Amino acid sequence: MNLWACELKDLVSVNVAVACWEWPSYMDPEAKKKGISVIKSPYQQYDNPLYSNNKIIGTYINSIMALHDALAKNADEAILLDKNGFISEGSGENLFIVKDSKLLTPKIDFCLNGITRQSVITMAQNLGVEVEEKDLLFDDLVNADEAFFSGTAVEITPITTLDHSAIGQGLRGPVTEMLQSKYSEIVCGKDANYTDWLTCL
């Protein structure tokens, strides 16, 4: 170690803080069974993160504004479209729809390739469900048999109402329920086939 490195080592210190707090359910716990309501947002995903009239900037601004708009309209969440008019995602979740037992999800051109999203795709394929990533029109969601969000906070949460109209039967569908059950088994360490997904501290 040279003299400069020794002097730098004496000057640099490492400070670490760990914050812990209770993490309640992001949605009402009953939502995992009953599902949630969503509306089509007037805000585009990554449309323009700079709102000069509000003097704010950031990639989460669209999502925050979309969620507040949805809540003000008595919905639980928002569906954002990308600049090409295709479905992107929720305000903080990835979206899946089920049509004729096939699982469809938006391509990742304008949405986050979330870890839970990737997990759902893998689980579905392992369970024999065909999965396709494609550009989805809003009408695809309107006409879906089932729909659900995925994400760290929401895990797998059914969407049963869109713009105050029922999706499919207006209930959690069988494919959604199957994926929820498998996801729960995996995160609780009850499926040995997925132990490499778990981290022990």
Image (cartoon, rainbow, N blue to C red):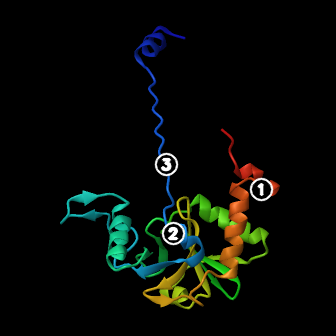
Residue 87 in view: yes
Tell me which amino acid carries mark 2. Asp
SS at circle 3: loop
Residue 107 in view: no
Q: Which residue, as the protein is rendered here, is positioned at the far left? A: 53
Mark 1 nearby-residue class (10 Å; few <14, some 14–19, many ≥20): few
State which mark lies toward you, 3 or 2. 3
SS at circle 1: loop
Q: Place residue 48 in its image quadrant.
A: bottom left
N-terminal of the pair, mark 1 or mark 2, is 2
The residue at 54%/64% (across/down) is 154
The C terminus, quarter of image: top right
Foreground residue among 171 and 201:
171
Q: Where does the image place residue 160, in percent across and percent down from the top left?
A: 54, 82
Q: Place residue 103 in its image quadrant.
A: bottom right
Q: Place residue 118 in its image quadrant.
A: bottom right
What label does residue 174 carry, if any? none
Work out how far the residue at label 3 is from the one at label 1, CA to CA, in angstroms. 24 Å
What label does residue 190 carry, if any? 1
Work out how far the residue at label 3 is from the one at label 2, CA to CA, in angstroms. 34 Å
Work out how far the residue at label 1 is from the one at label 2, CA to CA, in angstroms. 34 Å
Q: Is residue 193 left or right of residue 72?
A: right
What label does residue 109 carry, if any? 2
Q: Where does the image place residue 32, in percent across and percent down from the top left?
A: 58, 71
Relative to 89, say whether 136 is above or below: below
- Callout 1–callout 2 Cβ contact below 8 Å: no
Foreground residue among 198 and 130:
198
- Callout 3–callout 1 Cβ contact below 8 Å: no
Tell me which amino acid carries mark 1. Lys
Reading the image, the residue beneath label 3 is: 22
Q: Where does the image place residue 156, in percent across and percent down from the top left?
A: 60, 68
Q: Where does the image place residue 64, in percent across and percent down from the top left?
A: 35, 65
